[in-house]
Image: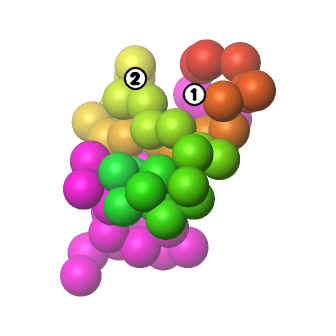
Amino acid sequence: MTAGHVYSQAPRCGECGGCALLIEEAAQALVKESLGRLVAQRCPIEDGWHVRTPADKAR
């Protein structure tokens, strides 16, 4: 596994408040495991995906 597969080892996005930069498959797996408590969002700056709570403002 690469860092983009594991949340705790993922690089952080300085432009998005330090959110983990994940590959899409890892982000979607976290969303699925959270039972709807998280959503996945493509990073607007870097090549990767973030997970966040639906209540968080979109970055």
Mark 1 to mark 2: distance in Å? 7 Å
Q: Is residue 44 above or below residue 46?
A: above
* Residue occupied by mark 1: 15
Proximity of marks 1 and 2: CB atoms separated by less than 8 Å? yes
Label 2 secondary element: loop
**What percent of the width, then of the height, locates residue 34?**
57, 59
Using a 10 Å C-alpha cutoff, classify the residue at mark 1 as few (fewer than 14 neighbours), some (14 to 19) or many (20 or more). Answer: few
Q: Which residue appears at 26% of the width and 47% of the height?
A: 24
**What percent of the width, then of the height, locates residue 44?**
40, 19
Q: Is residue 38 above or below residue 45?
A: below
Q: Is residue 28 above or below residue 54?
A: below
The quadrant of the rendering that contains the C terminus is top right
Q: Which residue appears at 55% of the width and 73% of the height?
A: 8
- Mark 1 or mark 2, which has the lower sequence index? 1
**What percent of the width, then of the height, locates residue 56?**
73, 27
* Residue occupied by mark 2: 45
